[in-house]
Image: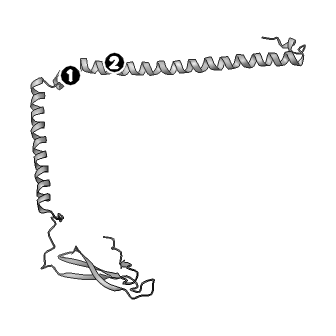
Amino acid sequence: MIATQALEALDPQQMREALLTLMAEVAAKDDQLQRQQREVAFKQAQVEKLTHELAVLKRLKFAATSEKFSAEQQSLLDETLDADIAQACAELDEANDDDRVAGKKVMPKRAPLPPHLPRRDMHHEPESTTCSCGCQMKRIGQDVSEKLDYEPGVFTVERHVRGKWACAKCQKLVQAPVAAH
């Protein structure tokens, strides 16, 4: 290290050498500091790991013995689990076999709304039945959905009929969007 009064007596070349020496010392100190920080982080992680392991071991050794399974209880639990799993697999296989035998699409099991309820038709058609190519569209079908409605004391069925329109020239299909329920 150079004293402050000696700095004034140094020529530029000696000043550069002193500066380079100081920069090397600072870099060495930075490396040493980073190495020490890594060691501290590693040791902290080891302390946390050992603390966790100690807590687990204490829990195993000093936990209430009434909460532990005996060998007989464990075997009973295993037997019932095996039986339940086997039964569930058998039911799934049976359901899959029924679907394969039928060979057709499985429809939902929802029952239709009773026919004696009054029905109210609501028709939803597109704004225009003229195609963008200039042709008049033809009605090719409709989608019907029914919704149960309740007004105090009276059940009714709302039938939403949405027509399907198609252009024979450009094969464009147009249908009114589904209304929010």
Model colouring: one colour
Give the side of residue 19 with respect to residue 143, left or right: right
Residue 130 picture location, percent across and down: 41, 86
Give the side of residue 143 with respect to residue 15, left or right: left
Question: What is the number of callouts on the image?
Answer: 2
For disc 1, the marked residue is 64
Answer with mark 2 or mark 1, whichever residue precedes in sequence.
2
Q: Residue at x 90, y 13 (%)?
A: 9
The kind of residue tagged 1 is Ala
Label 2 Cα crowd, 10 Å radius (few <14 / some 14-19 / many 20+): few
Q: Residue at x 13, y 78 (%)?
A: 115
The kind of residue tagged 2 is Leu
Q: Which mark is residue 115?
A: none
For disc 2, the marked residue is 54
Residue 127 picture location, percent across and down: 40, 83
Q: Nearer the viewer, residue 57 or 86?
A: 86
Q: Which image quarter: residue 139?
A: bottom left
Disc 1, SS: loop
Q: Which image quarter: residue 98?
A: bottom left
Disc 2, SS: helix
Q: Nearer the viewer, residue 133 or 28?
A: 133
Alpha-carbon distance for marks 2 and 1?
17 Å
Looking at the figure, which quarter contains the N terminus? top right
